[in-house]
Image (spheres, rainbow, N blue to C red):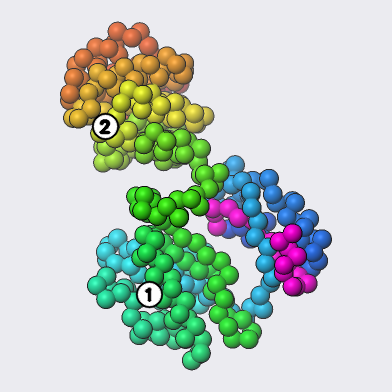
C-alpha cells in the first residue's frame, strides 16, 4: 500500500477534488495512527464532498492524497494570475497563507503584495527578492523562494495557465520552504497543444452536461437560473442572458451552438439544456448568417418531439431563411412561442414563468 512508503507516525489524508474549502468540509483529516488513516481513506472514497465552491451535490472523491504532516512555523500565499485590465501577468503574495485569498483581498487588502511581470523581459531576480522580503523571509529563504517562484512562472508560460497558486507555501520550524497545496487553471483553448495535460483531465470532476456538450463542440456553461438558453455566437448569448436578467428572469445556462451549427448539434443542445431539472422555460435566439434558420427550426422541432418537452419554448429567428424557419415552427403544432425581436423574446420567456 502507498501508505507503507511513508516513514512517519502521523498522517494527513486529503480528498482530491476540484474545489477549495476541503478542510472545513471534512476533506482533510490528520490522524495519529496508520489504521486511523486507512479508516479516513475508506470514509472519503466513493463519497461526494460538498464545499463552499461546489454545488449542493458536491464533487466525487475518487482519489486521496496521503502525506506526512509538516512542522509548520508560518503559512504564506503565492500565486500568479492574468490581470485583464493591465494585460499582464501579476504575481500576488501574502503573509495570510492557508486562507481564501479573495477573503484576504476583501478584508485586509494591504496584506497582499503584487508584482507585475513584463511580457518581454519576464520575471526578474529583483522581483523575487522584493516579494520575499515583503513576506519577511531571510537570506537563505529568499534563495528558496526565488527558485520556487521562477519555477512557477516557467510553468505558467509553458502550460498556458490563467492562474497558478500555492496555498499554503509554508515555512517549517527548520526554516525550509514547502509547497503544501497547489492549484492551476489552464486555458481550455490551449489544450490542443498540451496533450500531456489533456491526458490528466478528470471528467468526473466536471459537470456532466458540460462534458457532453464538449463532445458536440458546443460551448455550454451551467448556471443557477430557470431559463435555458440556446444561442449562436458568444456575444449574442451574453446579450440574451443580459436581457433575460433585465426582464426579471435568471438564465440556467450559457450555450453557444456556434456559427457552423447543424440540425444534429441543435437537437443535442436542446437535450443538454433540458437535462437540467431547474429549467422551466427555454429561449432559442438564432441570427442566421452562416447558419440557416430553417435548419435550426428543423433541429428544434426534432428535439422537442424526441425529448417530449413539457416546458414553454420561445424562439426568435432572424436572418438567413428566417421566414421559412418561423413557418416550419408554426406548422409543427408544438408548444413553441414565436418572437419577432430579442427584447420581445426575453419578455415572453420570463412571462411564461410568471404565468406558470
Residue 124: x percent and y percent? 33, 80
**Mark 1 neighbour class, 10 Å CA radius: few under 14, some 14 to 19, many 20 or more:** some
Tell me: residue 218, above or below residue 336: below
Question: Which is more toward the observer, 284 or 43?
Answer: 43
Q: Which residue is mark 1?
A: 114
Q: Residue furthest bottom?
A: 139
Q: Is residue 102 above or below residue 69?
A: above
Please check the rendered image and state whether residue 15 is part of the magenta-colored stretch, yes or no: yes
Which of the two marks, 2 or 1, is nearer to us in this view? 2
Q: From the viewer's perspective, is residue 322 above or below residue 167?
A: above
Point out residue 31 in the picture as x, y percentages from the top left corner. Answer: 76, 65
Location of residue 269 by image quarter: top left
Q: Earlier in the sequence, mark 2 or mark 1?
A: 1
Considering the numbered disc 1 on the image, is that residue within a helix, a strand or a loop? Answer: strand
Q: Which mark is residue 245?
A: none
Magenta span has 46?
A: no
* Residue denoted by label 2: 260
**Which residues fall within the magenta stretch?**
1-20
At 18% from the left edge and 30% from the top edge, which residue is drawn? 289
Q: Secondary structure at mark 2?
A: loop
Q: Residue 318 appears at what percent x and percent y?
A: 20, 25
Amino acid at each position: 500500500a502507498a501508505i507503507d512508503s511513508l516513514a512517519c507516525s502521523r498522517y494527513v489524508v486529503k480528498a482530491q477534488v476540484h474545489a477549495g474549502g476541503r478542510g472545513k468540509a471534512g476533506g482533510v483529516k490528520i490522524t495519529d495512527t496508520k489504521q486511523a488513516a486507512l479508516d479516513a481513506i475508506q470514509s472519503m472514497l466513493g463519497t461526494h464532498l460538498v464545499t463552499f465552491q461546489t454545488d449542493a451535490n458536491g464533487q466525487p472523491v475518487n482519489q486521496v492524497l496521503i502525506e506526512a504532516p509538516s512542522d509548520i512555523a508560518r503559512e504564506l500565499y503565492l500565486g500568479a494570475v492574468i490581470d485583464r485590465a493591465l494585460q499582464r501577468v501579476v504575481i500576488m503574495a501574502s503573509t495570510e497563507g492557508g486562507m481564501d485569498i479573495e477573503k484576504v483581498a476583501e478584508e485586509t487588502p494591504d496584506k497582499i503584495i503584487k508584482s507585475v511581470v513584463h511580457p518581454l523581459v519576464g520575471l526578474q531576480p529583483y522581483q523575487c527578492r522584493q516579494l520575499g522580503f515583503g513576506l519577511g523571509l531571510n537570506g537563505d529563504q529568499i534563495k528558496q523562494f526565488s527558485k520556487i517562484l521562477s519555477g512557477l512562472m516557467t510553468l505558467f508560460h509553458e502550460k498556458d495557465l490563467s492562474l497558478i497558486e500555492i496555498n499554503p507555501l509554508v515555512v517549517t520550524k527548520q526554516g525550509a520552504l514547502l509547497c503544501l497545496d497547489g492549484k492551476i487553471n489552464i486555458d481550455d483553448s490551449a489544450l490542443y497543444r498540451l496533450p500531456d495535460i489533456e491526458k490528466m483531465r478528470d471528467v468526473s470532476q466536471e459537470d456532466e452536461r458540460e462534458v457532453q456538450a464538449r463532445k458536440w463542440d458546443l460551448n455550454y456553461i451551467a448556471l443557477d437560473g430557470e431559463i435555458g438558453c440556446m444561442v449562436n455566437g458568444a456575444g449574442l448569448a451574453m446579450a440574451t442572458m443580459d436581457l433575460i436578467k433585465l426582464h426579471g428572469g435568471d438564465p440556467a445556462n450559457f450555450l453557444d451552438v456556434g456559427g457552423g451549427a447543424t440540425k444534429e448539434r441543435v437537437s443535442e443542445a436542446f437535450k443538454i439544456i433540458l437535462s437540467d431539472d431547474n429549467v422551466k422555460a427555454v429561449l432559442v435566439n438564432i441570427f442566421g448568417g452562416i447558419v440557416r434558420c430553417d435548419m435550426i427550426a428543423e433541429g428544434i422541432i426534432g428535439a422537442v418531439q424526441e425529448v417530449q418537452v413539457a416546458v414553454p419554448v420561445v424562439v426568435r429567428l432572424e436572418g438567413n431563411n428566417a421566414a421559412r424557419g418561423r413557418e416550419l415552427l408554426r406548422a409543427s403544432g408544438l408548444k413553441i412561442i414565436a418572437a419577432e425581436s430579442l427584447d420581445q423574446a426575453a419578455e415572453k420567456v420570463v412571462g411564461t414563468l410568471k404565468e406558470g
